Each structure stands twice: as C-alpha cells, then as structure tokens.
Amino acid sequence: MAGEFDGKVAVVTGGSRGIGAAVANRFAQEGASVVIGYNSSADEAHALKEELKTAGARCIAVRSDVVETEEVAALMNKAVDAFGRLDILAACAGISHFGALPTLSPQAADQVFAVNMRGQLFAAQHAAHHMADGGRIILTSSNAARRAVFEHTLYTASKAAVDAMVRCLSIELGQRGITINAVAPGATATAMVAQNAAKYQPPGMNLTAEEWLDVSYALDRLATPAEVAGAYAFLAGKDAAYISGRTLPVESCVF
C-alpha cells in the first residue's frame, strides 16, 4: 500500500466497525501505519487488522474505552511505541441516543456526553501531545447537530459540542501547526443507522425506508462508510492544509 500518507501514523478510535473501519481502511490504502482503537468489538477489530496487514499495511489493534481518559492516553502511547510517531487522529467512536424529554436521565446524559464529547476531547488532547507541526486531528460530528430531530436531544447536543470544540481548539493548536476539524456524516449505511432509521421520521410519519430516502435525500440513498471516509482522508491530506476549525458535512439531506 502506498499513497499520500506514506510514512504517516494514524490512530482511529471506534475503528473496528462502520465509518471508523472505513477510515482505517482508507488511511491504510494511502500508505499510513494504522492503529485501530476499539472497545467492545474485538473480533471485528482484529479481523480488520489482519485484512489490512495481508494487503501490506502496518497495523495494530488496541482496546481503548474512550470514556476512560487513562486508556485514551495509553492508546496514543502505544501508537508511538509501535510506529515511532503520531501524525493523524480520526476520532470516530460514538453512540446514539433517542429519548423523549420526560424520560431523560442524568445517567443517560453523562453516558452520551462521555463518549461523544468528552471522549473526543481527550483523544484530541493526548494525540496532540505526541504530534509535531503539521499534525491533523479529525473529530466526528453529525448532520443532526444542525437539524431538529424528534427525541434526539442528547445526541444532537453532544455533536453540536464537537462543532464548538474544533472551532475553539483550532486557535490553540494552530500555534503548533496542527489542524483540527470535524466530519458531519448524514445518514450512512451503518449498524447504528439501521437500528434507528425509523426514529428519524417526524411524529405521525410512517414511510417505508425507501419512501423516506426518496423524499429526504437528493441522491435517494444512504451514504456508504467508504464515501464518508473520503472526507477524513481529505482533511488529513495536503489539500486541506489551510482548513482548520471547520465541520465538513457529508450528506445529501434536502431539509
């Protein structure tokens, strides 16, 4: 494998499945040494690791719960121990949540923000600690952060916080020549979306999945994880050298 990221080292949290796995694969295809961070999906992570190694990539898989800051720090340390440096972080670990206002609990709020916001914040902190000038940090937001989605308050708020983080951290990290941005995927063909697809419709609307796509998306289909991964590769690449503090949407949603 050879390409734009030859000689670079990339850490991908949530790298065992869905968008994270596609991002890890894309970086490896472009020549990066890849560290797949995972929490509960050990089989998938190690299967992807072996697939990438068979294709010629340098790759390791490391268990790391992004809620536990010490484990996040250890993940970055293991990347440097294995490959000698750290150039790119793609923070893809995340969880979804739906719930009506009367049902929301402090525990649910803490869990969603711990993974989706705090986990990405401290991944950025510990990755930046190891990065030299020119490092790239890409967090994961959502198109839901800019839309009104029924009973989706905790999730959308946690992703809106990511948009705010990249804006503010761009100033601080820019002093070291490090860019930080976010990707905001729309509806993507992942297990998370499959489990929650019907919940994205407004109350009283009972369209089939095909009907919902037809009226809601200009391209009449879900994005593939590989298509979303292209946005992470762009923000990590040379053509995005002057982009920082921004959230890049990857969607064809028409409202």
Image (cartoon, helix red, strand yellow):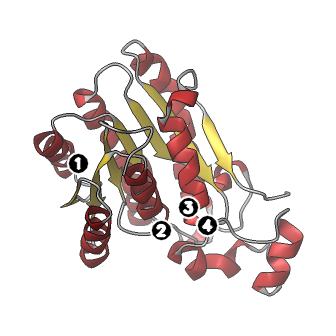
Image-based side of 249 in relation to 111, left or right: right
Q: Nearer the viewer, residue 224 or 192?
A: 224
Per the model, the C-alpha gap separating discs 1 and 2 is: 20 Å
| Residue that badge 4 annotates | 224
Circle 4 Cα neighbour tier, 10 Å, few/some/many (<14 / 14–19 / ≥20): some
**Callout 1 secondary element:** helix
Residue, x 62% and y 71% (percent of image)? 100
**Mark 3: secondary structure:** helix
Estimate the spatial distance between the alpha carbons at disc 3 and disc 1, rounded to whole Å.
25 Å
Sequence order check, earlier mark of 3 and 2:
2
Q: Which residue is mark 1?
A: 72
* Of the image marks 4 and 2, the number of the one nearer the N terminus: 2
Give whichever of 155, 243 is nearer the camera: 243
Q: CA distance from mark 1 to mark 4?
A: 28 Å
**Position of residue 142 measured from the top left corner of the image (x, y, whole percent):** 60, 53
- Name the N-terminal-most of marks 3 and 1: 1
Instruction: Point out the tag, 1 or 2, that comes first from the N-terminus.
Output: 2
Q: In this picture, is 186 found above or below 122? A: below
Camera-nearest label, 1 or 2: 2
Quarter-wise, where is residue 94 in the image?
A: bottom left
- Residue at 29 percent across and 55 percent down: it is 57
Are the residues tagged 3 and 4 within 8 Å (C-beta)? Answer: yes
Mark 3, residue position: 226
Which label sits in the foreground, 4 or 2?
Answer: 4
Q: Position of residue 160 (x, y in %)?
A: 58, 45
Which amino acid, mark 3? Ala
The local crowd at label 1, few if under 14, some if 14 to 19, many if 20 or more residues have their Cα within 10 Å, is: many
Q: Which residue is mark 2?
A: 18
- The residue shown at (47%, 31%) is 180
Looking at the image, residue 218 sits to the left or right of residue 45; the answer is right
Q: Secondary structure at mark 4?
A: loop
